[in-house]
Image (spheres, rainbow, N blue to C red):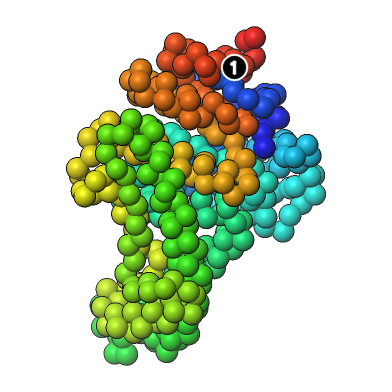
C-alpha cells in the first residue's frame, strides 16, 4: 500500500497544494514551521479520522476558510482508490470513496492504513491513560475497521449514561426532592456492558498479539538495554476474555459501583477508564524511564504496530515525523535498518544529514505553502 497523490485545500497552512508520491522512501525537507508535519497529519487523518496533534477539527481548517478538503489517492495491490474528506468544524465531516459519497465518514476507514510516529508520542509513555487507550483503539480499527462502529457505539452509550447521571447529580445539588430520574439507568447499563465487552475483548486480543512485537522492537531500537513489556489493566475482572464473561463482569461492576457513580455524576466503570501498563524490566516505564528510554519505548510501540499489521498481511504506510534529530548515531542506523523495507516510508526532517544515507530516497523541499520534488 502507498499514497500516490495527496491534495489539500485550506488544510492547516495550505491554501491549495498537491504532491505526487511513490512507493519506497520519500524525505520531506524544510525548516521548522513550514508545514511538513501538516502533510503527515492530513494522511493520518485519512487513516484514523483524527489528528495526532489536536483534539478538535477547528485548527485543521486554514484561518478564514469555512472547511478543509483532503484528497488522497491510495494504491493497494495494484488498484487505485481515491479518498476524499471535507472537514467542517462543528458539523459532521463529509466523505467520498472512489468519487461516490459514503453514508458515514468512518466508512472510509481501512482505505489507508498508516502508522505515524511523531514527537507527541512521548505521551504514550509519560502521559495520561487516554493516550494509551487511543493508541490501542486506533490500532484495533486499523486491523479491523468494524471496530470504528464499536467505538462509536460505546462512546455514545457512555455519553448518554453520563448525561443521565449528571442530571441527577445536579438535581440533588440544587435541592431537587427526587434527586433526578434514574429509572433508565439499568437500560444504559445493559448497553454499556454489551458494547464495552466487545471493545474490551478486542483490546485484550490486541495486547496479547502486540506484546512480542513491542519487546522485539524495543530490543532492536535500544540495542538490548532493557526488556519492554505491556499488559492491559482493566477495572473489571477480565477472566478468560470471552465476550459473554466480560459483559457479565461489566454488569456486576456497574452494579457494585452505582452508588459512587450517582454520588459523583459520572460513569466510573468501563473500557474508557482502563489503561495499558508499560514496563521496562520490573519497573513501570512511566516515572522511571529516562528521556532516551521513553523516546525509544514510544518508537517501539509504533514499530510494533507496524510489524503487527504486516504480520496480519496489511502493508501500511509508515511515517516518521522529525524522528532522527532526537536519536544518536547508533539508534539512527538501527532504526534505518528496521524501516528500510517499508512499502512506503515518509520521513520529515529539518536537516537532511540527520537522515541515514540508507533512507535518502526521493527528496521533497517544503516551504511556506508549497512542496516540490528536488530530484
Residue 72 locus on image (x, y percent): 69, 36
Q: Is residue 86 toward the left or the right of residue 215 in the image?
A: right
Camera-side residue of 158 and 279: 279
Name the residue: 41% across, 25% down.
334
Q: Mark 1 points at which residue?
A: 361
Q: Assess disc 1: are there few (<14), some (14-19) or many (≥20) residues with their C-alpha within 10 Å of its C-alpha.
A: some
Q: Is residue 58 above or below residue 184?
A: above
Q: Across the whole image, how many numbered discs are drawn on residues?
A: 1
Q: In this view, does 81 lie above or below 134?
A: above
Residue 337 locus on image (x, y percent): 48, 25
Q: Is residue 128 toward the left or the right of residue 119 in the image?
A: left
Residue 46 locus on image (x, y percent): 61, 43
The C terminus lies in quadrant: top right
* Residue at disc 1, secondary structure: loop
Q: Residue 179 is drawn in which quadrant? A: bottom left
Name the residue: 51% across, 29% down.
339
Q: Residue 232 is drawn in which quadrant? A: bottom left
Q: Is residue 370 visible?
A: no
Q: Is residue 138 toward the left or the right of residue 291 in the image?
A: right
The N terminus lies in quadrant: top right
User: In the current view of this chain or complex, which residue is farthest to the front?
Assistant: 224
Name the residue: 59% across, 63% down.
149
Q: Is residue 96 toward the left or the right of residue 43 in the image?
A: right
Amino acid at each position: 500500500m502507498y499514497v500516490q497523490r495527496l491534495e489539500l485545500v485550506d488544510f492547516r497552512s495550505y491554501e491549495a497544494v498537491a504532491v505526487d508520491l511513490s512507493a519506497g522512501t520519500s524525505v520531506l525537507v524544510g525548516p521548522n514551521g513550514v508545514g511538513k508535519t501538516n502533510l503527515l497529519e492530513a494522511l493520518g487523518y485519512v487513516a484514523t479520522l483524527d489528528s495526532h496533534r489536536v483534539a478538535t477539527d477547528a485548527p485543521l481548517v486554514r484561518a478564514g476558510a469555512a472547511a478543509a478538503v483532503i484528497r488522497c489517492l491510495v494504491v493497494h495491490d495494484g488498484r487505485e482508490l481515491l479518498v476524499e474528506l471535507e472537514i467542517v468544524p462543528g458539523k459532521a465531516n463529509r466523505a467520498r470513496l472512489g468519487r461516490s459519497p459514503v453514508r458515514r465518514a468512518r466508512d472510509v476507514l481501512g482505505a489507508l492504513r498508516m502508522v505515524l510516529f511523531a514527537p507527541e508520542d512521548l505521551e504514550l509513555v509519560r502521559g495520561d491513560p487516554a493516550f494509551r487507550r487511543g493508541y490501542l483503539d486506533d490500532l484495533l480499527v486499523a486491523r479491523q475497521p468494524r471496530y470504528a462502529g464499536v467505538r462509536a457505539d460505546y462512546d455514545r452509550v457512555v455519553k448518554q449514561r453520563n448525561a443521565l447521571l449528571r442530571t441527577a447529580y445536579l438535581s440533588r445539588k440544587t435541592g431537587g426532592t427526587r434527586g433526578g430520574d434514574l429509572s433508565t439507568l439499568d437500560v444504559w447499563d445493559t448497553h454499556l456492558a454489551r458494547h464495552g465487552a466487545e471493545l474490551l475483548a478486542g483490546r485484550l486480543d490486541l495486547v496479547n498479539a502486540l506484546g512480542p512485537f513491542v519487546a522485539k522492537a524495543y530490543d532492536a531500537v535500544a540495542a538490548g538495554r532493557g526488556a519492554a513489556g505491556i499488559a492491559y489493566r482493566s477495572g473489571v475482572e477480565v477472566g478468560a476474555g470471552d465476550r459473554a464473561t466480560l459483559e457479565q463482569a461489566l454488569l456486576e461492576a456497574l452494579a457494585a459501583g452505582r452508588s459512587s457513580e450517582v454520588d459523583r455524576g459520572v460513569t466510573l466503570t468501563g473500557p474508557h477508564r482502563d489503561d495499558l501498563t508499560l514496563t521496562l524490566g520490573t519497573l513501570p516505564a512511566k516515572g522511571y524511564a529516562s528521556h532516551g528510554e521513553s523516546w525509544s519505548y514510544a518508537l517501539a510501540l509504533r514499530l510494533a504496530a507496524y510489524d503487527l499489521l504486516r504480520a496480519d498481511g496489511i502493508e501500511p504506510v509508515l511515517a516518521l515525523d522529525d524522528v532522527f534529530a532526537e536519536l544518536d548515531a547508533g539508534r539512527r542506523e538501527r532504526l534505518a535498518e528496521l524501516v528500510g523495507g517499508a512499502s512506503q516510508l515518509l520521513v520529515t526532517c529539518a536537516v537532511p544529514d540527520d537522515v541515514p544515507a540508507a533512507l535518502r530516497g526521493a527528496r521533497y523541499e517544503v516551504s511556506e505553502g508549497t512542496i516540490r520534488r528536488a530530484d
